[in-house]
Amino acid sequence: MIPIAGQRIRKGLDMIGIGVIGYGYWGPNLVRNFATTPDARVVAVCDLDRQRRDLAALRHPGIETTDNPRTLLENRAVDAVAIATPVASHFELALQALKAGRHVLVEKPLTQSSEQGRRLIEAAERAGKTLMVDHTFIYTGAVRKIRELIEGGEIGEVLYYDSTRVNLGLFQSDVSVLWDLAVHDLAIMDYLMPEEPRAVSATAIAHVHGQPENTAYLTVFYSGNRIAHVNVNWLAPVKLRQTLIGGDKKMIVYDDLEPSEKIKIYDKGIELNGDLEAQRNIFINYRTGEMRAPTFDRAEALAVEAKHFVECVQTGKTPLTDGRAGLRVVRILEAAAGSIAAHGQMVEL
Amino acid sequence: MIPIAGQRIRKGLDMIGIGVIGYGYWGPNLVRNFATTPDARVVAVCDLDRQRRDLAALRHPGIETTDNPRTLLENRAVDAVAIATPVASHFELALQALKAGRHVLVEKPLTQSSEQGRRLIEAAERAGKTLMVDHTFIYTGAVRKIRELIEGGEIGEVLYYDSTRVNLGLFQSDVSVLWDLAVHDLAIMDYLMPEEPRAVSATAIAHVHGQPENTAYLTVFYSGNRIAHVNVNWLAPVKLRQTLIGGDKKMIVYDDLEPSEKIKIYDKGIELNGDLEAQRNIFINYRTGEMRAPTFDRAEALAVEAKHFVECVQTGKTPLTDGRAGLRVVRILEAAAGSIAAHGQMVEL
Amino acid sequence: MIPIAGQRIRKGLDMIGIGVIGYGYWGPNLVRNFATTPDARVVAVCDLDRQRRDLAALRHPGIETTDNPRTLLENRAVDAVAIATPVASHFELALQALKAGRHVLVEKPLTQSSEQGRRLIEAAERAGKTLMVDHTFIYTGAVRKIRELIEGGEIGEVLYYDSTRVNLGLFQSDVSVLWDLAVHDLAIMDYLMPEEPRAVSATAIAHVHGQPENTAYLTVFYSGNRIAHVNVNWLAPVKLRQTLIGGDKKMIVYDDLEPSEKIKIYDKGIELNGDLEAQRNIFINYRTGEMRAPTFDRAEALAVEAKHFVECVQTGKTPLTDGRAGLRVVRILEAAAGSIAAHGQMVEL
Amino acid sequence: MIPIAGQRIRKGLDMIGIGVIGYGYWGPNLVRNFATTPDARVVAVCDLDRQRRDLAALRHPGIETTDNPRTLLENRAVDAVAIATPVASHFELALQALKAGRHVLVEKPLTQSSEQGRRLIEAAERAGKTLMVDHTFIYTGAVRKIRELIEGGEIGEVLYYDSTRVNLGLFQSDVSVLWDLAVHDLAIMDYLMPEEPRAVSATAIAHVHGQPENTAYLTVFYSGNRIAHVNVNWLAPVKLRQTLIGGDKKMIVYDDLEPSEKIKIYDKGIELNGDLEAQRNIFINYRTGEMRAPTFDRAEALAVEAKHFVECVQTGKTPLTDGRAGLRVVRILEAAAGSIAAHGQMVEL
């Protein structure tokens, strides 16, 4: 399971030195994965909390720790920075890192606003450095398999994407459930859907007075007869990660909590026959064929993602989830927040 | 299973003669259940289709069949009429029946518009007859148990109702999925929620050009911090009947497709501690206790409902799902249709 | 759902008159299905219990009812007899019917002993009449599909059949859980397995003193490296109908309680490589491919079976589940009972 | 999640130095858990494979590594030895360790034979050292909760234990599925059942010629009307960890693969009424009440177990899973192997 080779701490010519800012919930996963990524070496970890720094030091002997991002950025062994701090600090830290000539991987969502996102993209271009957003699900074997199924034509035209992503989750005080959970679906949709959405209508509620919304419902409109819907909730009794993707040939159920069959492809749908002008249900036939659960790559998403980031840094190629992908998602989140404030009124993108 | 006594065809003083209009999908269930309801006797069945009439006659020897509702209404043995025809005909048939001095049970939704609903309620009052709408789920043991749990205080304040009701269903050409599937949830909400909603925001799509919407998403707003959401879809690969009901003490998962444990009560939630003014997540504690699946009455809903209708007819008492309940649901459907046309803009009720 | 044509009560030249003996739990299903079988007509029903006879008469006007099997057998309109009485009476009733020149369909298990089974087979041959046993599962689309998968070679060599068939069931006072539940699996195995078993080892327990065993475990040995195991229990908290069928190419999970995907075919298994003489696990490779859930005929098993019985009666062809199939199953039950008495000692067949 | 304090590498007066022999599949879990156990410190790791030793050294800087168990036993900092090697070597290694005056924790099963088990117990007594067997499941919150439910009387008299433990597993060439998987159930039964079993009947098959049995079925007999059954299989398409425990008051379903509700308690059963001498099913009533899923301690079993081992070593108290528990399980395995050889014939214990 654990590739031994990747754990040898050496730093050759092309070896990328990684600095991780933020060692809270997600940071340790970044450190652990970069530690076993070929051509990468975790050089430094920054966290404001002393206990977290001690823990990083204990787990990864030889890593430099600091409570000051500036110190980390001044470290010449740091070629690239992974930022896993609260959303509010993403923009400033990423901007500083890019200005300091470092490649940057930012935790999702990229920034708090599309304006910030655009400025980061510009900064990265000016610096000629890689800017990548950590849309983790894009690097899972399951989501990549679904894209393959869509691109290969097996599903046909995608008619809808419908996701329920709820659990009794960590209420966050700085961002709403929209920016915490819905961002996953928007990132997946950005990767899977063959076009960009054109508008969004959203509603939400904050059950705890003064706190951000903990329940939100988004409808995302595309051109033609395509739609997406996302239901996110931090106050649910059970954990659900249930996604239906309806195509005009086949339909997919994607359940990330299923231990083995995460993707099920149903050879089901309707067929329109006869005189469509007549528009009577007699012309709609129901098709119910077999279901199959394909195999897919089961590598840890973050390992795949870390490798991809290092490769982009080394070769200069554009990441799958580059700054623009991050910006596209932030724009929808921003529009959704506007729609929520307007009680569901559609906001164009 | 089948109470023999109820099947004896006799008609005493208090015996209610039932006429059923519409012997398509739902009508046979009405006939079958009224046939075994104490104090009721199915006298006549009306259907336009000869094959359906023949089938009714074969299954229930002794029942009069006709293709003309007027004939059925002129039958003096018919004291009450159950209407199971397409929605578009509900209003006219019910109005005729009430004017002819018959008690009326109408399939859901009550009418096509709230204006029609109001007129039926007036007609029933004028005629001094019972008007009841067939909100079947209200008569299931599961939904009645959930109301009991809410009223008994075990759940605490209801914070949200969230339902996913999807399947590869019969595309209907006269009504949208809203009037076909969402009506079930609106009827359940009308029964369970301690107050009437104040507004609705809805979005939808018709994947088949020229046909009614087959996918719809409703957010229903209540006063205070209460919300409801309904996701209905005729074009889903799997059948889901999944309802989450979040209370501030406990939370319910209600899954009508579960063969045994349809209701699960989770002793889960959050607790707010400390200085709420500070509004930091450090004051939100997560509580995770046991789950329990209570028992409930497993009698067939329609049998319970038929008995209730006959009792209301006999005693003059107001049905649990009277015309006003039907009207309240139609008003939300109407508002939702308006919101869909306005791309999600909230419509006040 | 209900084919109207089949319900027309007429009796042409080739029309087979059916008499049903026993109108308890299963008899009504037989009557209901023969009533809609082409070329069949239910003529008479016999039950000792007056209430049951009244119910049959109420449901099926025109059927003759009697409390005396002899009366039913003397009815010249009765061409064939379906026996759905307690097991202890199967042999006598079937024998009388055959001697009276009637075709016979007997509820499972065929008889209480293999001796009785052999005598019935002889009697049927002597009379030149059809003798069929109601091994219902053989007529389900699911089991027929599994046989197709095995015969088509997709599964490869069948290595094992492993079934868990438990629930909180009706404790029977005349037969043990072996003769009530395990009989289903033995009938399915008789149909699916490419050879007859050669021995059985079984254990069981009666938790209620003086009552038959309510829990039993059977291991059935075949030649070569093939085995079967059946776990049956009337005292289980949940209902399970879980069957694993392992082949050397693929493996099947068959769950009769699954509403849609009853059969799942797993492209999983082991592959033996290298020097098999070395016999070290390094030579066993694990293969994990996709899973698929095929479609299958969803017609009601008993309808298919009734049609097959009538066809065999008309044409003289040998039923799929003839007396010999019934006998083969009874022989295993008998041997299993012997093994139980000997605390698991293997009994050769 | 990870207690930081426990990771500080220090060794005070009562600090127990742990040496781990075998760093293959299970050894790393032992090292990881002892590393965070209060009052314990992992001093040395022994493995024949150089790559495994390198990995241990990389992960746990400061640990001594060796390919020779003798070297590890000569290390004076080693107070206690945890043995996670193939079963065939358990006896020799544990005996050497005890003779060298070390406390011993042995991977399950304790030994290859009851004779060996007895000799280890004697050796431990002679040396005055702790001998414990790693029956991991006994230290899970779920199994401890079930014991609590049984001891508290909620379940009533335990009538049966029925476990299905199958998957497409690692075919082992040194031990059969009995010694690999069934041992878990026998250990759980040893902990839960109120008495020792008195006999066993078992059957099994080796689908790969020359390899140990990969499929086995055990029936374990207790006095009175109590029974247990274990179905283990390395060649199954799906992973099942399904245990039914029937009591005369309530029944438990324990499924270790359920992410949240691992234990479900069903208020179901039968009640015997009336004249039991009459022995007719009319006197058996079925009771179906609510189901509840209790909460339980979710701490990692091996962490609890490591702490318990250290405590026993420090205080001299008898481990929950001492050598005698290990021996009791080995005796049943031995008897089961005998019964398998005799094709199911019951072997007394």
Image (cartoon, coloured by chain):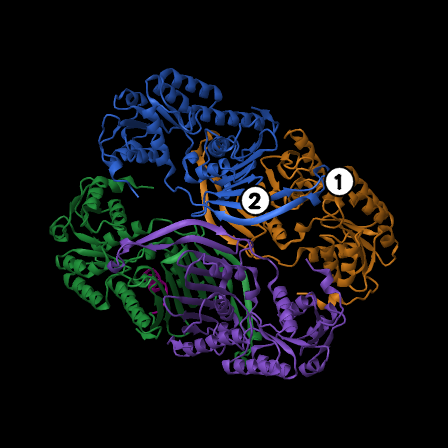
Chain colours: A blue, B orange, C purple, D green
CA gap between label 1 and label 2 equals 29 Å
**What span is colored magenta in the figure?**
D182-195
Could you tell me which residue is drawn at 37 percent across and 29 percent down?
Answer: A84
**Disc 1 designates what residue?**
B112
Front one among C275 and B25: C275
Front one among A96 and D293: A96
Few, some or many C-alpha atoms within 10 Å of disc 1 (few <14, some 14-19, many ≥20)?
Answer: many
Q: Residue B101 location, x and y as percent?
A: 86, 51
Instruction: State the SS at label 1.
Output: loop
Front one among D198 and B236: B236
Residue B245's tag is 2
- Residue B32 to residue A190: above or below: below
Question: Which residue extends farthest top?
Answer: A126
Q: Residue C193 location, x and y as percent?
A: 46, 66
Please state, as top left, top right, bottom left or bottom right, where the N terminus of chain B lies in the image: bottom right
Dot 1 or dot 2: first in sequence order is 1
Q: Is residue D112 left or right of residue B226?
A: left
Q: Are marks 1 and 2 on the same chain?
A: yes
Q: Residue D141 location, x and y as percent?
A: 37, 53
